[in-house]
């Protein structure tokens, strides 16, 4: 794919291990097919929390971790130790030392182009870290550090780095991690990348996609009725009694004949739509009717008559 250098807003993940996270990326900028996203500081914090949770669960020796260190623009220089809790062998006698790294941050100089520096641990560095205190009341600042623990014991100069922001965004894992687009699934069953906001099959908008079981059932009941009456837009349902039952079907403001012998519907189709709603209602909680867009209809015969509207059809 040719590089476009055109960025989009989307979400990415790594299987079910990391994400999904909001990000910005150039979809043509790929490494072996994988994406190179850039994240806001808030999204970076979410990513950091997930990497640390993974490291605690699976071990630091097989997980990269992201760290966000907070400070103030007018703070004095601080030293922070990032410790994996692991040790590694340092000589032929079997002596071991902690696998850790120190981050020295000149907060007051960051605005003038200075950067945080990473160093190995020494007694002097540990002493400086113990004396470091968060000071200042200036603007909030943050430093982001990416640590690849599996390479730390090999003295690799690429085992850790400070992630420099560009236009307020942090590029993490690009050309290195297997980032791919997060997906959303339309109620009709079609799957799409997150930034594809409209379903190509049914026209459903991602943000309007039904999210609760009852809202999904409402869509499914409407799709069932539309098999025989494509122009159907809403229906009334009576919840009085043991079972939910569709009373009327409308096409706009026009009442559709639901009689089995004179109208377009057959009893099997109406019964199928009834059953879809009944199953969802059995699991419904207080407030689910309103959340699914069900509107109470005043009626002399029943106080449990509702009107449910079906999503608009694709033009």
Image (cartoon, rainbow, N blue to C red):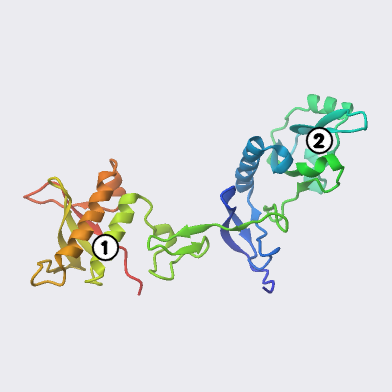
Which quadrant is home to the N terminus?
A: bottom right
Closer to the camera, 10 or 240? 240
Residue 120 percent location from the top left of the image: 86, 36
Q: Residues within 10 Å of mark 2 (few under 14, many from 20)?
A: some
Closer to the camera, 70 or 18? 18
Q: Residue at coordinates 8% horizontally, 71% vertically from top-left? A: 261
**Is residue 78 something one can see in this rendering?**
no
Asked if residue 133 lies left or right of residue 276, the reply is right
Kind of element beneath mark 2: strand
Name the residue tied to disc 1: 222
Residue 111 percent location from the top left of the image: 77, 46
Q: Residue at coordinates 55% horizontally, 57% vertically from top-left? A: 182
Kind of element beneath mark 1: helix
First-in-chain label (2 vs 1): 2
Spot the residue most to the left: 301
Name the residue tied to disc 2: 102
Residue 75 percent location from the top left of the image: 75, 34
Q: Mark 2 and mark 1: span between their CA atoms?
A: 60 Å
């Amino acid at each position: 794919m040719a590089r476009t250098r055109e960025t989009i807003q989307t979400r990415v993940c790594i299987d079910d291990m990391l994400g999904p996270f909001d990000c910005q990326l150039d979809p043509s900028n790929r490494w072996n097919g994988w994406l190179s996203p850039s994240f806001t500081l808030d999204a970076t914090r979410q990513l950091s929390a997930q990497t640390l949770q993974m490291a605690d669960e699976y071990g630091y020796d097989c997980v990269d971790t992201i760290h966000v260190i907070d400070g103030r623009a007018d703070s004095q220089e601080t030293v922070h130790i990032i410790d994996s809790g692991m040790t590694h062998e340092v000589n032929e006698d079997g002596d071991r030392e902690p696998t850790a790294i120190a981050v020295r941050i000149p907060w007051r100089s960051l605005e003038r182009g200075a950067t945080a520096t990473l160093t190995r641990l020494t007694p002097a560095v540990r002493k400086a870290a113990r004396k470091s205190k968060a000071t200042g009341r200036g603007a909030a600042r943050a430093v982001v550090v990416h640590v690849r623990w599996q390479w730390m014991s090999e003295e690799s100069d690429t085992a850790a780095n400070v992630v420099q922001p560009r236009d307020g965004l942090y590029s993490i894992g690009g050309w290195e991690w297997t980032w791919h687009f997060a997906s959303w699934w339309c109620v009709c069953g079609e799957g799409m990348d997150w930034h594809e906001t409209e379903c190509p099959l049914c026209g459903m908008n991602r943000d309007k996609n039904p999210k609760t079981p009852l809202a999904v059932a409402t869509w499914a009941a409407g799709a069932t009725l539309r098999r025989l009456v494509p122009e159907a837009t809403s229906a009334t349902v009576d919840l009085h009694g043991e079972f939910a039952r569709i009373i009327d079907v409308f096409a706009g403001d026009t009442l559709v004949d639901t009689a089995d012998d004179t109208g377009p519907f057959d009893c099997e189709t109406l019964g199928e739509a009834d059953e879809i709603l009944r199953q969802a209602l059995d699991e419904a909680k207080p407030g689910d009717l309103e959340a699914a867009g069900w509107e109470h209809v005043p009626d002399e015969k029943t106080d449990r008559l509702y009107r449910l509207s079906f999503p608009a059809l694709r033009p």
